[in-house]
Amino acid sequence: MTGVAISRTQQFRIDARRLAARIETLGGVGAIAGGGVCRLALSDEDRAGRDLVVGWMRELGLTVAIDAIGNVVGVRQGLESGPPVMAGSHIDTVSTGGRYDGNLGVLAGLEVVRTLNEAGMVTRRPLAVAFFTNEEGARFSPDMMGSLVFVGGLPLDAALATVGIDGASVGDCLQRIGYAGTARCGNTPVHAYVELHIEQGPVLDADGFTIGAVEGVQGISWTEFTVGGIANHAGTTPMRLRHDAGYVACAIASHARAIAREVGGDQVATAGAVALSPNLVNVIPFKAVITVDLRNTDEAMLQAAEHRLHAYAAEVAAAEGVTLSHRTLARFEPVAFDPAVVNLVEETARALGHSVRRMPSGAGHDAQMLARICPAAMIFVPSADGISHNVQEFTSLPDLEAGANVLLQVLLKLAA
Ligand code: HGY
Ligand code: MN
Ligand code: MN
């Protein structure tokens, strides 16, 4: 910007050490060995994290609303009223979570508010900082549940009735932690939504970029297969007489990986959860429940992978003489973010002197749901060695600072 007066707000910068300190404090809620976090949605740890962040929102003067699915939105008044420009993400984690996944986007939003409060600067449009319930989907499917209800994509009653992997329902757990709010869910007007998030993959770190201008999110397909076999003695039962549910589940997992390897490109496949019954060394399993997570940036290719997997599962089950059923835990098509906001992210990063590249998101995010009701986009910062959903998850302070400053300037432009 040589020769052009830089406006006062363009000089605003967040306080990186303050942000890092907040990340560490929140990371201490549900802390696990190795520097990670276990804060499963609607758990006691999630309640403690929610209480902490709501307290910080109130300290900043935000008006806090909690909706019926437990989404929390803090609003900062603007010079004018109307739909806010929103920053946000999630503070629930997987059980081997890191300190940055989701938490960064929420805490950076609050750091932006604090920076503007200290500068005495009021934006034309209101600003909002949100965290959405159960983004991870690890305890209750689907993922991005709270933001999906927020945009009217999942009926509230269906979400509340959802039973998790431990047998508890979303509704009961929300009541138990005191976050069954009164604010109306669904189609709350938002002017625009920007989410700062760690990449959780290897691209930015490997290619030496500081900022990712995220163009969209790939398609997600979560299926749970249930296999019914016959328990029998592991030593006395000839192979030809077996109806081994465990073998079929493992065959499905192995074939999912083979499909991904054969298709190549963006296709990925993960068998993340498996339960065998009775799960004993010398008993042929009579039951197996296994999940398969398939993703691809291309919807047609994702459907093709799904069809191949289901055809194989049926074939191997029939050959083994076991029963097979399945249910869809989550299914979202690829989402493209708003080109104007993606451009704004890219231009802002460049104007701040950061290296930036456009890219898709391999992970699901609340932004893909907000994109249904307003212009939305994401800002990525690097994950060291591409590691995430792992206690070793790490993003350097300079990268955190760069991402939060891009968020600050993008929000200012959208709220001007
Ligand atoms: O599964 C995901 O992509 C996200 O972590 N919920
Ligand atoms: Mn996340
Ligand atoms: Mn995650």
Image: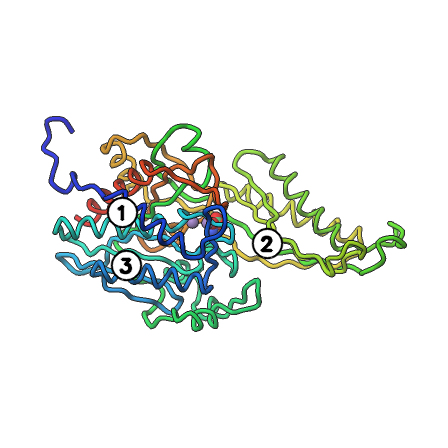
- Residue underneath mark 3: 56
In front of the other: label 3 or label 1? Answer: 1
- Dot placed on the residue nearer the N-terminal end, 1 or 2: 1
Secondary structure at numbered mark 1: helix
Q: Position of residue 288 (x, y in %)?
A: 70, 57
Q: CA distance from mark 1 to mark 2?
A: 41 Å
Placement of 180 over or under 192, stated as above or below: below
Residue 18, disc:
1
Res 75 quadrant in image: bottom left
Q: Position of residue 247 (x, y in %)?
A: 75, 50
- Residue underneath mark 2: 223
Q: Around disc 3, counting alpha carbons within 10 Å, would you say few (fewer than 14), some (14 to 19), or many (20 or more)? A: some
Secondary structure at numbered mark 2: strand
- What amino acid is at disc 3? Trp
Q: Is residue 8 left or right of residue 140?
A: left
Q: CA distance from mark 3 to mark 2?
A: 38 Å
Q: Are the residues tagged 3 and 2 within 8 Å (C-beta)?
A: no
- What amino acid is at disc 1? Arg
Q: Residue at x 48, y 72 (%)?
A: 172
